[in-house]
Image (cartoon, helix red, strand yellow):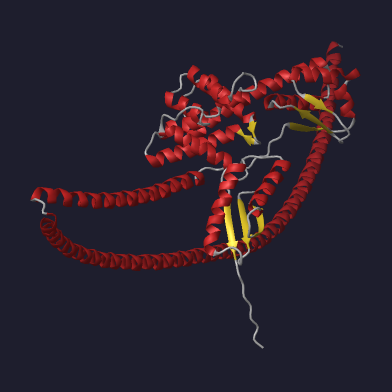
């Protein structure tokens, strides 16, 4: 029984095992088939993807080929454009080269013409020199001939003297010593006359040469210095952005104006003139400070007494800095390396000082250059002359603040800062108050006169100008025989027309001198006035 159960259990187990193996095989087979199908599907998908990628790659290759063709075509086009541009640049460069060659050719032609002109000039000068040499040779021959004639005349004179001596012996019955004294006395008188004539001629010749030399020095000095005409006034005008600004400048009950005038010392004039205010005052430095302060206030817009005081202080500092810079600039311009800083600052104040409308600092620099040029021509100390010319009007910088003339103030100031005695004397003597102790003082006086008297250097009122011209014409017209007189060139020349029947050619010389003497005696004027007397007589005859 037990054996049967065991067998049955074994059979069941075997059958179960076989059934399980079959079922497992079926399951595995099914799984394998599914995997194979999936693998087949995956392979199909991969193959499809590969075909798609190949197609995309082929499309991309075609696109790249097309792009390469396009790039190639673009490169060809760019190449052609570059070639065209290069050809255009080459053409432009060729044109520039041709223009440059044409300019150089023209310049060479000009140089050749100039060289030709110089050669002609040299040939002309050579011919002149040859003519002068021949003239000198002729003069030398003439001198030799005159010397021979003089020797003959001297021999003849000696014979005459000997004959006269013998005659005197015979007539006057004089002894030899007495006759000798008589002859020597007569000869001495003749020699004195001849020597006086020679001295007079020599003096005239030396004077003429000295005048020519002096004129040449003055002309060279004037030409080497630049000069400006004057345009200075005693008022300054400040522009306003609008009319409302006038009320802000005036302030409540005029307190801003009172504060501004008290701080600057300048009168502030506000009238009906649109968009401007006027600053009036005789002190140019204060007027400049007031102008700068007003411009700052207008720009800032805040106008009240405290702000006015702040702006005036800033403007005063700026002007003081400008003054010192102006003094240093003048020294650098003239090559003066050492000077006391206080004296430099005082010199810079002349930038804001005028005399008859002429800026005193510009005038002082001009005088320094003129004096230095003339000193160099004469072999004197050029640097000392420049220094004396620059400082000759230094007193005008502070003559409004200190009592005394600008000459006295300048002398005291330069002595205080240890300037040389020559400079001090040039300052003291430039108006003739004391004797001039050096040639440099003379040069400073001459340079000062030139700078002050040149046309446009100083201004004068219209009334004085018209009166001076009228007086010049009236003096000329007061002489008998004068037909008309005209003052021209701002009164520096008077042209006098005379009646030819009343005044002869010899008389016009005397008339010009008489008019000159009367003008010098009765009129005050800067520089020189040229008197030109014109006598013209015309006779007409008509043939029919």
Any part of residue 337 in sight: no
At x 61% / y 49%, what residue is drawn?
492
At x 28% / y 64%, what residue is drawn?
136
Q: In this view, does 131 lie to the left or right of 259?
A: left
Position in image of residue 393 (x %, y %): 55, 29
Quadrant where the N terminus is found in the figure: top right
Quadrant where the C terminus is found in the figure: bottom right
Q: Is residue 286 left or right of residue 539?
A: right
**Front in this rendered view, residue 542 or 62:** 542
Residue furthest top as drawn: 2
User: How many marks on residues?
Assistant: 0
Residue furthest left as drawn: 176
466 shown above or below 503: above
Position in image of residue 308 (x %, y %): 79, 19
37 shown above or below 316: below
**Front in this rendered view, residue 240 or 127:** 127
Any part of residue 235 in sight: yes
Position in image of residue 244 (x %, y %): 90, 29
Q: In which quarter of the image is residue 454?
A: top right
Position in image of residue 301 (x %, y %): 83, 24
**Front in this rendered view, residue 429 or 64:** 429
């Amino acid at each position: 029984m037990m054996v049967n159960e065991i067998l049955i259990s074994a059979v069941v187990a075997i059958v179960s095992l076989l059934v399980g193996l079959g079922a497992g095989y079926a399951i595995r087979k099914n799984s394998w088939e599914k995997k194979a199908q999936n693998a087949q599907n995956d392979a199909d998908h991969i193959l499809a993807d590969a075909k798609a990628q190949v197609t995309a790659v082929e499309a991309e290759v075609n696109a790249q080929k097309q792009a390469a063709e396009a790039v190639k075509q673009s490169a060809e086009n760019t190449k052609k454009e570059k070639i065209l541009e290069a050809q255009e640049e080459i053409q432009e460069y060729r044109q520039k080269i041709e223009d440059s060659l044409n300019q150089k050719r023209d310049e060479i032609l000009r140089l050749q013409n100039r060289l030709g002109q110089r050669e002609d000039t040299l040939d002309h000068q050579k011919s002149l020199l040859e003519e002068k040499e021949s003239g000198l040779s002729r003069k030398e021959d003439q001198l030799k001939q005159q010397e021979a004639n003089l020797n003959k005349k001297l021999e003849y004179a000696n014979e005459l003297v000997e004959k006269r001596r013998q005659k005197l012996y015979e007539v006057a019955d004089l002894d030899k010593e007495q006759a000798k004294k008589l002859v020597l006395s007569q000869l001495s008188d003749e020699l004195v006359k001849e020597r006086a004539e020679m001295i007079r001629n020599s003096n005239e010749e030396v004077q003429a040469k000295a005048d020519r030399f002096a004129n040449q020095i003055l002309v060279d000095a004037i030409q080497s210095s630049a000069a400006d005409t004057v345009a200075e006034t005693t008022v300054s005008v400040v522009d306003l952005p609008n009319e409302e600004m006038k009320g802000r400048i005036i302030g409540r009950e005029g307190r801003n104006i009172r504060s501004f005038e008290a701080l600057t010392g300048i009168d502030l004039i506000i009238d009906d003139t649109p968009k401007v205010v006027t600053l009036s005052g005789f002190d140019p430095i204060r007027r400049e400070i007031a102008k700068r302060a007003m411009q700052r206030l207008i720009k800032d817009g805040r106008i009240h007494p405290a702000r006015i005081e702040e702006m005036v202080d800033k403007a005063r500092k700026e002007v003081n800095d400008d003054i010192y810079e102006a003094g240093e600039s003048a020294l650098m311009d003239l090559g003066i390396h050492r000077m006391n800083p206080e004296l430099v600052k005082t010199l810079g104040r002349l930038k804001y000082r005028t005399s008859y409308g002429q800026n005193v600092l510009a005038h002082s620099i001009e005088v320094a250059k003129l004096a230095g040029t003339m000193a160099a021509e004469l072999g004197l100390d050029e640097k000392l002359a420049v220094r004396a010319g620059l400082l000759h009007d230094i007193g005008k910088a502070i003559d409004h603040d200190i009592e005394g003339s600008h000459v006295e103030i300048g002398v005291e100031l330069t002595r205080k800062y240890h300037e040389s005695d020559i400079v001090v004397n040039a300052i003291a003597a430039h108006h003739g108050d004391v004797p001039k102790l050096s040639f440099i003082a003379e040069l400073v006086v001459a340079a000062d006169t030139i700078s002050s008297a040149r046309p446009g250097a100083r201004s004068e009122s219209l009334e004085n100008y018209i009166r001076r011209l009228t007086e010049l014409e009236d003096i000329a017209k007061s002489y008998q025989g004068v037909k008309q007189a005209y003052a021209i060139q701002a009164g520096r020349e008077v042209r006098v027309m005379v009646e030819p029947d009343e005044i002869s050619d010899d008389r016009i010389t005397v008339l010009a001198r008489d008019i000159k003497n009367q003008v010098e005696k009765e009129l005050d004027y800067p520089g020189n006035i040229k008197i030109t007397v014109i006598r013209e007589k015309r006779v007409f005859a008509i043939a029919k």
